[in-house]
Amino acid sequence: MSLLPKGAIDCDIHPSVPSVQALMPYLEDHWREQVIIRGIDELNSISYPLGSPLTCRADWRPASGRAASSVEMVRAQALDPFGTSVAIANCLYGVQLLFSEDMAAAFARAVNDWLVKEWLDKEPRLRGSIVVPTQNVEMAVDEINRCAADKRFVQILLLVMGDTPLGRRHHWPIYAAAEKHGLAVGIHAGSAYHNPPTPVGWPSYYTEDYVGQAQAFQTQLTSMICEGVFTKFPDLKVVLLESGFTWLPAHLWRLTKYWRGLRMEIPWVDRAPADIVRSNVRLSLQPADAPDAATLMKIIDHLQSDELLLFSTDYPHAQFDGTAAIPAGLPDSLVRKIAIDNPRATYARLMEKVA
Amino acid sequence: MSRHVVATAHEIPEGGRKLVMVRGRPIAIFNLKGEYYGMLNRCPHQGGPMCEGLITGLREAKQPGEYVYSRAGEILRCPWHGWEFDIRTGQSYIDPGKTFVRTYPVEAMAGESVVKGPYVAETIPVSVEEDYLVVEM
Amino acid sequence: MNEIRSQASPDVAASSKVGVGDGDIHPARKGPKDFHPWLARRWQDHIEQYGSPGRQGWQAGPAYPKSQPNASRRDAYPPEGGRPGSSLEFMQAQHLDTNNIELGVLNPLGSGQGVMNAELSAALCHATNEWQLAEWTSKDNRLRASVVVPYEDPVASAAEIRRYADNPAFVQVLLLSRTAEPLGSRKYWPIYEAAAEVGMPVGVHAFGYGGNPVTPAGWPSYYIEEMTGHSQCQQAGLTSLVVEGVFERWPSLKMVMIEAGFAWAPSLAWRLDKHWKTLRSETPHLKRLPSEYLRQQVWWTTQPMEEPDNRDNLLDTIEWMGWDRFIFATDYPHWDFDDPAHALPVKASEAQRRAFFIGNARRVYRGCGG
């Protein structure tokens, strides 16, 4: 088994909101009372059915209450066993699924304030991603500006499936804000379900939904590249989270092939898509979708870069057994890049001193 | 290297083109504003017949949403996958350093000098009254 | 005037001496009246007044404008006039003869599939099937037809498939990939039942308009995004077919994924296996690993071949999938055509080339000598 070096940086863990009650102290008066008046239940997205074997690994599931819902649990299960020095918390409470922009913005604020008070303040190894109401880009930018002063926020969190493709220009104020504040843009698996979660309609099984996340990442990568996000924001770092990665070489071959003949439609894409990805896009390690180390090494060879993968456990999702978060059989030098060097190079704010 | 007479100059008006065979190779000849350019009729990608491609201008952009148009009539799109080539130099637009279509110098010459030789006139009877296109290969 | 009349290119590099099978040829109508011999008068009138729209907004043409007229090679216009692909004689000269095609599977597009009016869709599909026989397969014995079906009406589709059960000119059932529901949905099961019964593989060709945005995050802006996206649409359809249990239920059913490339397949198989193992309590009807269904019952046409900078990378992909999974295709006369002389730029044994270029096709398509 490849050993994780000391000081690994885990780029994707999921502390959970234990219940809407936990957010009440962080909601403004009107919204706090709306929750009571309307009996607003949990914002539980079907992207992670609460009881599914993937949503929480069996040995991490608490006897009662939500998985990953306390600092103690996260320390004991996600941080200590891996010797992690820093872990980035991506909260997947279903804020983006709401249709009311104002409600979404209120819940986003509450989740971010809760993350700071209940997690970042209590555990110095934690960093956070800013949850934003993508339903309204201006409000999303307001929230980014509000949270950015806290250097423990290192990233903006977007879902891979929202209302419109993420490359579209009306999203660009978010990327401008990311650039301004030195934040990475994290695109995480999951849908707002405002569109069918596959390009061919609604599936019948959760298995289809989860496997299909990879196709969503493919189309979003296409969108961001073709729309010229990286021409407009050349220093932007985009991280695909819980996306898998073995699909990436084939996708780039295809997109690059079409770009050679269809450049006229998108003349601002003045270098090969594969080059853009190598400079601006990163992917978290788990779920590691290569069947063995030899295949994983081939994929890295096909990508022509060993700088793309960022270590993650995807805690508490069930992607590996025990502490085998790094696939067995990888050379130490590569493991070190994945676990430490690549995350540091990606998240500018990780290196900043925090209060 | 030898010089081959392939056509009379007036066969290819400005903006026009003609496909000729020279030493067994198909060469597309283009007239850009009175200057002649020859190119192998085979796209470096998969061999598509360049002479059947569309001649266009060039669009470039420094920023998304811009379509800065220039060089009307100077770019050739392969008729198959649409790869763009500079007619004058044969360079591809997407990879000018490594990907290009083979070009051949073409000159318009007065009939008198052609008649004197040494030129290979494969199928064209030459006379002193005409101008001819000569491909160097 | 820049246009030049085209001829069969005499300078195309000599193809392999082995005959080539082409799993994706697109015959086209010369004009709208071509179908009239097999289209009831009421539908002819209906089309004249109301058109035959599918689930997208234009009266004519595709949702995203193409990069070349008719999405075709510019040198594929027949000398006598008409659209690319509409002249058998020109197709023979430019493609079948020149490229040594000994087996060509017709996949007629614009044939009424996905048309919103279900009865009209069925009528157009049937007319297309008869037209393939009358104008194509009866005139060139290298060509074979696909049963074009109005797939959003699976019962009518099953009837159309059974209608041609005993006609050896038909070697496959044709669906499009962007359906209203994922392909594995129970809604479409009558189609698979009929195809398995008559022994025809089901080909799933890129395109169609099911009414869903063409990405799971909404509608993209550009044609290049739509084209790239066929890979994702087919992955989604194939995932559905596996997980819904279509391959488990019909173990003799074969599917061919057409015109979306293939290099995406190994990753899909690995991902399906990995997550199915975790989630298998959701799908007790599946008795084998997802990748096993793919390895045993699914083929891929090769076009558009992916083009890594390092060509040997393609060999990795082919070996992950197996040389027996590929059906060579050109997509003639479309612009992203793959020329058989250039399409496989990697070292391969004679046996591998034979399987890739003709052997697999003969085994997969009904009655083609495999």
Image: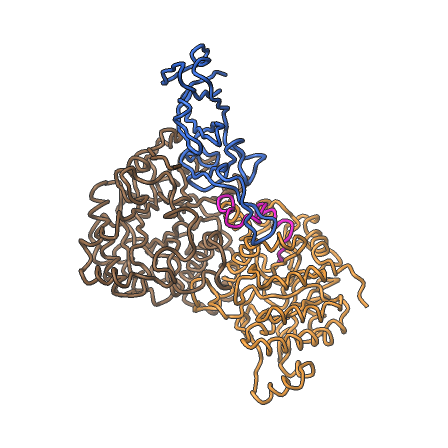
Would residue B71 be counted in the magenta stretch?
no
**Residue A262 drawn in magenta:** yes
Q: Nearest the camera: C144 or A64?
A: C144
Residue C224 % position (x, y) = 48, 51
Relative to residue A314, is residue B33 depicted above or below? above
Q: Which chain is brown?
A: C
Task: Please tell me whether residue A62 is drawn above or below residue C126 in the rendered image.
Answer: below
Please give left or right for residue A11 compared with residue C138 in the image.
right
Where residue C261 appears, as percent x and y from the top left, is 44, 48
Q: What colour-coding does the image apply? A: by chain
Q: Identify the chain drawn in blue.
A: B
- Viewer-side residue, B36 vs A299: B36
Tell me the colour chain A is drawn in: orange
Residue A352 placement: quadrant? bottom right
The answer to which quarter of the image holds residue C52 is bottom left
Magenta-drawn segment: A259-285
Count of labels in the image: 0
Apparent side of residue A58 relative to residue A183 in the rendered image (left or right): left
Is C362 rendered above or below residue A183?
A: above
Q: Residue A276 at what x, y percent from top left? A: 61, 49
Q: Quadrant of the C terminus of chain C?
A: top left
